[in-house]
Amino acid sequence: MNQIVSISDKRREKKWDFERKMLRKIDIRKMETNIQDWIKPIMPFHLQAYPFLIDQCMDVVIDAFLLGTEFGKFGVRGESLNHSKGRCHEPLGQLSHDLATTLSTWGNKGVEESMVMATDMLVGSWWEKGFDESFKAHKMRLV
């Protein structure tokens, strides 16, 4: 007798397999130095005093990377990077502002605006890296 499999389960498995393949492309050391490059000028001593803040930043950066990989397929179909980034403006902004709020609660008061700008740039750059990796994988038909 055949087993009945729902389409949503298959889609979820396919998405997880794709995300696992894309996560292999991330260099953790590069990500950590990139986070330090963007956040350390605003919070010079907080990242050393509270090392768990880097872990929270890494979680958000990985989410941004995976969000970018979801939109790489549109790049293969001819959509520009900026147009694809505009499609997911709301989730990207939410990731960035959540990270900025978290870091601002541990940091100095009065740096919220610069923190939002730094987290926007950090999240946006990793979204673009995810988009590029997915674009390459779809172009070479690896996925």
Image (tube, rainbow, N blue to C red):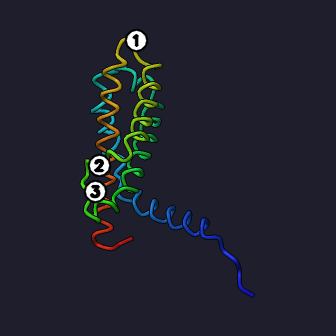
**Residue lying at 37% horizontally and 41% vertically, measured from the top left:** 89
Q: Which quarter of the image is occupied by the C terminus?
A: bottom left
User: Which of 17 and 96 lies nearest the eye of the viewer?
Assistant: 96
Where residue 61 sits in the image (x, y, percent)? Answer: 39, 42
Are discs 3 and 2 less than 8 Å apart at CB? yes
Which element is circle 3 on? Answer: helix
Label 3 – label 2 distance at C-alpha: 6 Å
Q: Please, what is the three-letter code of the amino acid marked with disc 2? A: Glu
Are discs 1 and 3 less than 8 Å apart at CB? no
Within the image, what quadrant is residue 119 found in?
A: top left
Q: Please, what is the three-letter code of the amino acid marked with disc 3? A: Asp
Q: Which residue is mark 1?
A: 109
**Residue lying at 28% horizontally and 43% vertically, measured from the top left:** 125
Of the numbered discs 1 and 3, the one sitting upstream in the chain is: 1
The nearer-to-camera label among 1 and 3 is 3
Of the numbered discs 1 and 2, the one sitting upstream in the chain is: 1
User: Which of 56 and 87 lies nearest the eye of the viewer?
Assistant: 87
Give the number of the disc on residue 88.
Answer: none
**Residue lying at 44% horizontally and 35% vertically, measured from the top left:** 94
Vertical placement of residue 94 versus 130, above or below: above
**Residue lying at 33% horizontally and 58% vertically, measured from the top left:** 72
Give the number of the disc on residue 128.
Answer: 2
State left or right for residue 35 relative to residue 12.
Answer: left
Where residue 49 sits in the image (x, y, percent)? Answer: 43, 22
User: Which of 50 and 142 lies nearest the eye of the viewer?
Assistant: 142
Q: Which residue is mark 3?
A: 132
Q: Residue furthest top?
A: 109
Q: Residue furthest bottom?
A: 1
Query: Dot 2, how many residues are within 10 Å of its Cα: few (below 14), some (14-19), or many (20+)?
Result: many
Query: Dot 3, how many residues are within 10 Å of its Cα: few (below 14), some (14-19), or many (20+)?
Result: many
